[in-house]
Amino acid sequence: MEEEHYDIETLPNGARIVTEAVPAVRSVSLGLWVATGSRHEKAGESGAAHFIEHMVFKGTQRRSARELAQEMDAIGGQVNAYTTKECTCFYARCLDEHLPRALDLLCDMVFDSKFDQADVDTERGVILEEIGMYQDNPEDLCSERLMAAVYKGSPLARPILGRKATLDKMTGEWLKHYQRTHYRPGSIVCAMAGSFTPLMVDALKARLLPLEAGETPTAVPAVYTPAITLKKKATEQNHLTLAFPGLPYGDEDRFVLQLLSTMLGSGMSSRLWQEVREKRGLCYSIYTYGAGHAETGVFAIYTALSKDTEREALETILRVVADFAEHGPAPEELERARELSKANVLMGLESTQSRMSALGRGLLLQDRTLTTREVIDAYNAVTAEDVRALAQRLFHLSQASLSVVGRPAAEEEYRTLLGQ
């Protein structure tokens, strides 16, 4: 395996640049990562980070929204952004010959947006439609309500998109001020991977150096608390998310958790898929996922099925989880999960976008980026006993949470099922 070489430079104002030259590719991916997301917002600011993500596409001092869109298409690549609870990322992927233009475009959008009031009013309507779209999706709603319940009273409980009541109060000037106070250089990481010249690194520095240093926002700590949340909604199926405490994103056992999740609910050979869908025919889809944050996390199991088979499905899921925690994985089961996870890592090396994301997210959220060799070694080091011990640590019914959207039963019935 060819070892990667990353270059990391911290500028005098605190902004960091991480780069990785990838031989024999013609593409390059550039990301501007900012350590501000929905969990850094106060209650009255809910949705601000995501609103700003939208507004940077609405025009700068040098380019109108139409001109931004035309230039994005002209470079023949991709320019986009997303907001999470922990951070905001703006990124571009293009051929190396278009990198100077893409870099100028991205920096202009992020650091010199106009926040024109008319554009703010228009885009607020777009975001409200986006909120409606997610609320119409029972799978997303189920997950969102779970997070709101287990982190109640914490910024982690609030939706990334915000609420109409908070969005209605946000003006262009207010958003511009919020961005200026949260997009401090100490909160910014620029990541670049692929084909580029040293001149492009210098160009990045030139855009970052004028940024004024200042205090970076901090997040209010959150604690997982078990909860049950039920939502009546006119759907054909009941959508269920069963959850347990998970791990913070930088936890040393995160590779163990990844393999555990793969064996329980990722793919057609996973235990839950085989037992709940293949053997019993109780659902069409079932999967597991983890949501890790700086100091806490959630491990969740999602499925959707008929109200008539809900109880049998939940009992089956709990039985599979309990058996896994008691006995751990079989040797061949662990090896399948290990090889699948390693293959995903190694195949990701063929994408400059994946490389850039790993560099940016790692440096921003964990202050370091693992090499591929370190990741592969971490997966290779996981033993069956490691997996069993982690399952026993996490899967306590007293700590179980449940979110149901559709035609839920009475809360007491679910508590009885969970032994609460």
Image (tube, rainbow, N blue to C red):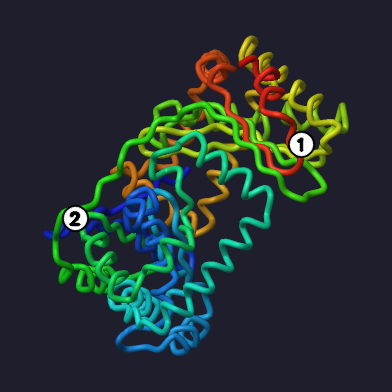
- Cα–Cα span, label 1 and label 2: 45 Å
Query: Which residue does the numbered mark 1 point to in the structure image?
Result: 268
Residue 338 shows in this picture: no
- Measuring from the top left, give residue 310's x and y in whole percent: 79, 31
Q: How many other residues sit within 10 Å of disc 1, few (<14), some (14-19) or many (≥20)? A: some
| Foreground residue among 391 and 369 | 391
Residue 125 shows in this picture: yes
- Measuring from the top left, give residue 16's x and y in whole percent: 24, 56
**Residue 52: quarter of image:** bottom left
Query: Which residue does the numbered mark 2 point to in the structure image?
Result: 10
Relative to 64, 204 lies left or right: left
| Foreground residue among 418 and 99 | 418
**Residue 154: quarter of image:** top left
In this view, the residue farthest toward the top is 326
- The reply to whether discs 1 and 2 touch (Cβ–Cβ < 8 Å) is no
Q: Residue at x 52, y 74 (%)?
A: 125
The secondary structure type at the circle numbered 2 is strand
| Foreground residue among 161 and 319 | 161
- Measuring from the top left, give residue 172's x and y in whole percent: 33, 76
- Measuring from the top left, give residue 61's x and y in whole percent: 30, 86
Q: Residue at x 41, y 33 (%)?
A: 296
- Using the image, determine if residue 73 lies above or below residue 10: below
Q: Residue at x 34, y 78 (%)?
A: 115
Amino acid under disc 2: Thr
Which numbered disc, 1 or 2, marks the residue that appears first in the sequence? 2
